[in-house]
Amino acid sequence: MKISIYRFNPETDQQPRMQDFELDDDSLDRDTMLLDALLLLKAQDETLTFRRSCGEGVCGSDGMNVNGRNLLACVTPLFSLRTPVEIRPMPGLPVIRDLIVDMKQFYRQYRAVDPYLVNKDPEPEVERLQSPAEREKLDGLYECILCGCCSTSCPSFWWNPDKFLGPAALLQSWRFLADSRDQATDERLANLDGPFKLFRCHTIMNCVEVCPKGLNPTQAIGRIKELMIRRTT
Amino acid sequence: MGLRVWLLQRVSAIYLGGYLVYVLVHFSLHPRPDYAEWHNWIGQPLVAIGSAGFVLALLLHGWVGLRDVVLDYVHHLGLRLVLLTLIVFLLLGSGLWAIRILMQAGS
């Protein structure tokens, strides 16, 4: 199988380039994931660099752009991909080396939405309880693994990564706005107002299209707008 | 600024859609008006006011859309301010022109 991979080492290279690799089909079977293939290629050429950790779609380390689409290499069956497979780093963030991008901007936007429970009541003896219905509202929100596939496929995030929070951070913002135990609704909404942080979203929905966990940031953004309208009228 | 402008875009879109449906229905019921018929139609107070509302909604909607394009793509602060100002003047000018046309048709 032919695989073409983006190579760039800023210490030695002037320009990034695409390098063609060939994988022996005998070393592959139906269950081979893209990450397995990358590990085989790394055995061929140990300078090939990429992030990986859990290998089962939980840690969110191996987000990359394959045939023009962001995905997690560890949960993508190799034979589901059109050949020759073209692998590039996730777009819109600075490349550190090969398939590794600098996620600093992404994490900064995540931090900017205060992704933690804010509750000013005195700490109770037991846990802060929720009804099953209240807990259900967090389904489809808490599962985010912060792989960055959504935000780096969002044109609005490409154009304004420092000002627009991006789908991943906004999904987390809604995760805490929707939490019955959180008491910072007004502060959170006030923090999101203005033309950039939330309202650069033009419902392009690339985020929904690529999310490896099947989450829906566009819907979360819509819910935030709905809540803003309800709070101001 | 964020929410209000976004709402303005949605509300103006609804008005534009409604007006468009009205105009399409009107002209499919009364196709090919001559000048007198056209003048008579646009001169009716309700139609004139509705059309003025259409122009206003169109300008506001256009302003939000063009502002979005500038905010998305133009990152140099000075250039952005110049472009936004130009757009406002262009839209204001078009609005005044349209109102003049409507006033002439109504008189």
Image: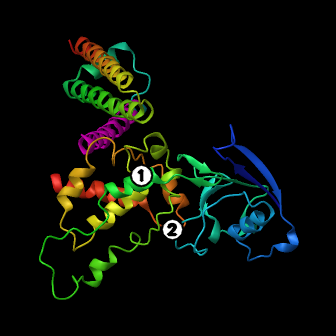
Q: Residue furthest bottom?
A: A126
The crowd level at tag 1 (other Cα within 10 Å; few <14, some 14-19, many 20+) is: many
* Residue B15 highlighted magenta (yes or no): yes
Tell me: residue A160, above or below residue B56. Answer: below
User: Which chain letter matches label 1?
Assistant: A
Disc 2 or disc 1, which is closer to the eye? 1
Horizontally, residue B80 falls left or right of residue A63, namely left
> Which label's residue is closer to the chain start, 2 or 1?
1
Q: Which amino acid does label 1 sit on?
A: Gly
Horizontally, residue A198 falls left or right of residue A152, namely left
User: Which chain letter matches label 2?
Assistant: A
> Image quarter for residue B81?
top left
Question: Where does label 1 land, which residue?
Answer: A166
| Colouring convention used in this rendered image of the protein | rainbow
Give the total of numbered labels: 2
Residue toward you, B72 or B41: B72
Tell me: residue A202, above or below residue A139. Answer: above
User: Residue at point 51% right, 69% down?
Assistant: A213
Question: Where does label 2 land, which residue?
Answer: A214
* Residue A55 highlighted magenta (yes or no): no
SS of the residue under disc 2? loop
Tell me: residue A118, above or below residue B37. Answer: below
Q: What residue type is labelled 2?
A: Gly
Kindly indicate whether the residue at mark 1 contacts the one at mark 2 (C-beta within 8 angstroms): no
SS of the residue under disc 1? loop
User: Residue at point 16% right, 88% down?
Assistant: A125
Q: Where is residue B73 in the image (x, y as percent from the top left)?
A: 45, 33
Tell me: residue A109, above or below residue A51. Answer: above
Q: Which residue lies furthest to the left in this view?
A: A122
Q: Which mark is residue B66?
A: none
Q: Position of residue B40 (x, y in %)?
A: 28, 18
The boundaries of the magenta stretch are B1-27
